[in-house]
Image: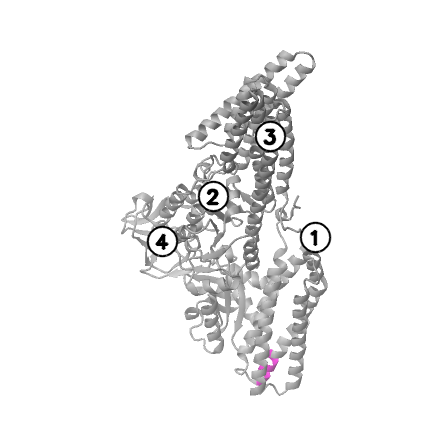
Amino acid sequence: MMTKEATGQTSAAPDRAPSPVMVLAAVALAMVGLGGLLYLVGQQDLGLAVWTLTTIAGIVPAAWFVAADVRHHRLGVDVVALLALVGTLAVAEPLAGAVITVMLATGRALEGWAGGRARRELGALLQRAPRSAHRYGGDGVIDVDLDAVVPGDLVLVKPGEVVPLDGRVERGVAVLDESALTGEALPVERLAGTAVRSGVANAGGPFDLRTTATAADSTYAGIVRLVAESEASSAPFVRLADRYAGLFLGLSILIAGAAWIISGDPVRAVAVLVVATPCPLILAAPVAIVSGLSAAARRGVIVKGGGALERLSTGTTLLFDKTGTLTMGHPELVAIIPAPGVDPDLVLTMAASLDQVSPHVLASAVVAAARTRGLALTLPVGAEEVPGQGISGHVGGHAVQLGKLSWAAPDAIGPWVRTTRRRAELDGAMTAFVRFDDRPIGALVLVDPIRPDAARTIAALRRDGIRRVVMVTGDRSDVAATIGTIIGVDAVLAERTPVDKVEAVRIEQRSAPTIMVGDGINDAPALALADVGVAVGARGATAASQAADVVLLVDRLDRVGDAVAIARRATGIARESVVIGIGLSIVAMGAAAAGFLAPVWGALLQEVIDLGVILNALRARQTPRVRPLSADAARLTRQFRGEHRTLRPDIDQLQTAADQLGTLDEPTSLAELRAVQNFLVTVLLPHEVTEEQDLYPAMAAMIGGVDPTGPMSRTHAEIAHRIRRFGQLLDDIGAEGPDEADVVELRRFLYGLHAILVLHFAQEDEGYLSLGDDDPLTTAPSA
């Protein structure tokens, strides 16, 4: 019997040597052929002897399998096979016994292939865990073994290092990447006196830590223990075949016994047992499961064995981590909010130029945004990073600062500052203010964006039988609630530690089989405890991948939906094959009991039944619901995804322009409005037209149906209509600039158009552009 914990203790490395059952299958097949050849050339006695030896060779493993079942206090399908093998020898039908041996060994080999799982060891956790600390002593800072550090010691944590023990910040400001524990993508600051947990990474400058726990009692060691305990407490898994075995075993023995008693001929009883040998149970289920594993692998999903696939098919409650799972896990620039009269490109150019030399987690997002917009960057001179505050330097002869409001722009005032701070609070965003020479010129707003395929994936999962979806995260409640509402989950559990996540899984398991999806070390204990753990492993979260039953090799959430659909289809086909095969076997058992089938012919008939159920089981190789994009459609999705990334900051400028109306003088205000109009007419509108002409026909051909892109085309028409009206409104205002009534009308218009564009881009990202694959692995044809 395969169990979740037992299979977790097999070797992670593939065994290159063939298994004993594979060797037995090959030898038995060769012996059947050799016996047949000897029989044909007149050496009947020798051929019978070869078949007899083959039958005996089959009795040994069959008896071993039965003994193993008895040790687990159950009787499985192997009992019927053992009785049939012994019976063929008793009534001198060795050929039938040899055929059963081939079938038995082949089925076991297939089942071992389907059920083999990688070892779930804690190697990744242990490799990441620090083994030494930089402790202050009489001779300065010395490196000591972690076990030598006691509570109260003062240790130095260098930039980029993992915090080795729990403690409190003694001196300096600690800028920490806590995503490994909390899932929060954005770095956090810990001031002097603030508690810090082991396992988080130092994303800023060096700081001193006063330890409050030993290595064994620290948070990181606790997570390692949680994973081990969760794996050990996992419920055992029973093979699909064994769930049908009890009834079939009793029925087979009953029919065989009745045939013997009524006819007085033991050969009939053996013939019944031969055709009752549960080939559909031993062969069909593993073949279907293996086919399902193959189909999942072609979609970039590695399922660690047949047991995991079957458990995945039964899950009805789904728990998602947020950061890196439902969100992208890395920040993106979503808005540039300039001070009055400042060009937004200047704000981004200065910030990105300075950030080129910064190791800060937000720096790469700022630089990438500037390069996407085609801005020319200048290498800074004299750049200096102030941990927890920001970075300063000279760009093109100008003094530039980028960082916190209180550090980079303490004198900034006006509506644009309030807008920036309000957006950060409402959206859970991080802001960076820019100072140019002696004045603040604007701010950048960065967020961890929701995956474009998140809402579509959850909707698809509900169609596939998932009844409850829960988001469990270490992030703030307000941020988590907003994301949960957008993607459509049933419950949001925020501000949860790794221990809380494990408890959440336990609570959900009381009501239904659970699937947990996560990507970080903080998710590993919950992944190990859940009935099925799914790791989004594309970005190298090795600990989560090793603790999970299913690993997504591509960084796409929709593969969770694919995995569930494939698992349900494969196990459904396996059950269908088993039921059909058992039904045919029962009919053959009736014929054998009536004396119409000799044991040899019964064995051959059973092989025909085997072939039929195996061919049916192979249908599980097909990937459900997957329509590969054409090369042209895939190219278009990549093209327009890139255009969307480029256009989003400009679209957000519509909101910024509306906010600034009434605060600028009339000529400046009119110039800003004309710049907005120029963007709408010369950039945005051509983008929408190209989508309508190129992208939508390709999507319609893939989706099928009658005018599937019609509603989205209607939105294009509405956007074009509003852009035209905006131009008419500006022409009506004239050169004198907007008055108070015009400001109200313009704001209403800009806010409305901004909302439409944001929603429209999100719909295209989720409905169309997220269908494209960038990884060649995921575009392999489904067979």
Question: If the image is split into quadrants, where does the C terminus sit?
Answer: top right
**Distance of mark 3 from mark 4, alpha carbons?**
69 Å
| Distance CA(mark 3)–CA(mark 2) | 49 Å
For the point 51% across and 25% down, the residue is 62
For label 2, the residue is 546
Kind of residue sitting beneath label 1? Ser
* Amino acid residing under circle 4: Arg
> Mark 3 or mark 1: which comes first in sequence?
3
The vertical placement of 18 against 508, above or below, is above
Which residue is tagged 4?
A: 197
Q: Are marks 3 and 4 in contact (CB under 8 Å)?
A: no
Kindly identify which residue carries mark 1. Answer: 630
Residue stretch rendered in magenta on the structure = 666-672
The amino acid type of the residue labelled 3 equals Gly
Marks 3 and 1, how far apart at CA: 53 Å
Q: Could you say where residue 182 lies in the image, as x and y percent from the top left?
A: 42, 55
Label 1 to label 2: alpha-carbon separation = 35 Å
> Which of marks 2 and 3 precedes in the sequence?
2
Q: Is residue 266 magenta?
A: no
Question: Could you tell me what secondary structure mostly forms the magenta stretch?
Answer: helix
Q: Do callouts 3 and 2 mark residues in contact (Cβ within 8 Å)?
A: no
Confirm or deny contact between disc 1 and disc 4 (CB under 8 A): no
Q: Quadrant of residue 97?
A: top right
Q: Secondary structure at mark 3?
A: helix
Name the residue tied to disc 3: 590
Mark 1 and mark 2 lie on one chain; the one further toward the N terminus is 2
